[in-house]
Image (cartoon, rainbow, N blue to C red):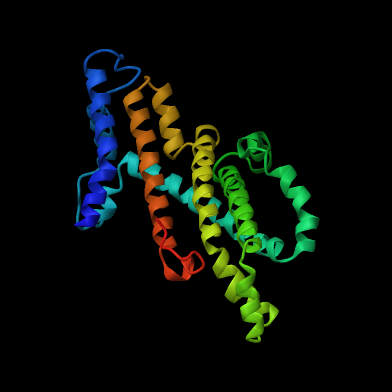
Amino acid sequence: MERAARLVRSLVVPVLLLAAWEGISRAGWISAMFLPPPSQVLTRWLAYARPLEPFDPSRTSRLAWALTGELPRDAAASLLRIGVGFGIGAALALPLGLLMGAKPRVFELLNPVVQILRPIPPIAYIPLAILWFGLGNPPAFFLICLGGFFPVLMNTIAGVRSVDAIYLRAAQNLGAGEWTLFWRIMVPAAMPFILTGVRVGIGVAFICVIVAEMIAVNSGLGYLIIDARNAGKRYDLVVAGMLLIGGVGLGLDLLVRRIERFDEVRWGLGEPAA
């Protein structure tokens, strides 16, 4: 019952915004060309999500057939790029962040370089990415990797350096060695910070993949948006693509928040994650 009430409360504001958006567009206060009403956006979304071929059970499963529309294919292409690029970035940032957080000398050695590179937006690397990797997926992977690397790195460092000293002293008193302290105390205690970095990094990765798809590749949600803009100014499809990006991002964020609820992740916080 409580979960249902929370779901209803979370839907109140989105429903009111959609109703106001529909009313403003239908009333003619804003031209439908500049802001298509939600009903028109939904119609366009369904048209582009519709499978391109009739269903043939002898050739494919119903799920695979349902995903053959243009919109599902573009969404899958963007998610693939985010998965590969962010996975590489997080895989590089996590061990480096743990090392820099646990070893002050390593931190002093590498932190100046990190602080010089961190403020540079990944989008600024687009000319170099195209020069180094050409067009297609490789430059997109590179930009997404950069976008996810620094949020995970900085939060991992902060998490390791903020581990309560009482945990370390208690483990040392019980005879734990340096390796045990690192893997059994520091890493689990830093996990809430690491997942916060993952949530931030995924958001930055979405920005990077959309920009990369608008410039360097010919598939994905970013390409869908820019192609809809250029091919007849189909702004209803532009908005549909934007809302799909937001929906996918929300789903990934909810997945990470679900992981944050595990006892192994939040044992150092004392209270369940919100």
Which quarter of the image is occupied by the N terminus? bottom left
Task: Using residue 57 as the reference point, say whether residue 146 is left or right of it.
Answer: right
Q: Where is residue 269 in the image (x, y as percent from the top left)?
A: 49, 64
Q: Which residue is drawn at 62% across and 86% down?
A: 174
Is 268 located above or below residue 15 in the figure? below
Residue 113: x percent and y percent?
Answer: 76, 48
Q: In which quarter of the image is residue 39?
A: top left
The front one of 274 and 144 is: 274
Asked whether 264 or 2 is in front, the reply is 2
Viewer-proximal residue among 202 and 225: 202
Residue 52 can be seen, yes or no: no
Q: Which residue is situated farthest in the front direction here?
A: 166
- Residue under the image location 64 percent in, 70 percent down: 165
| Quarter of the picture holding the C terminus | bottom left
Q: In this view, does 3 lie to the left or right of 212?
A: left
> Is there any visible trace of residue 103 in the rendered image?
yes
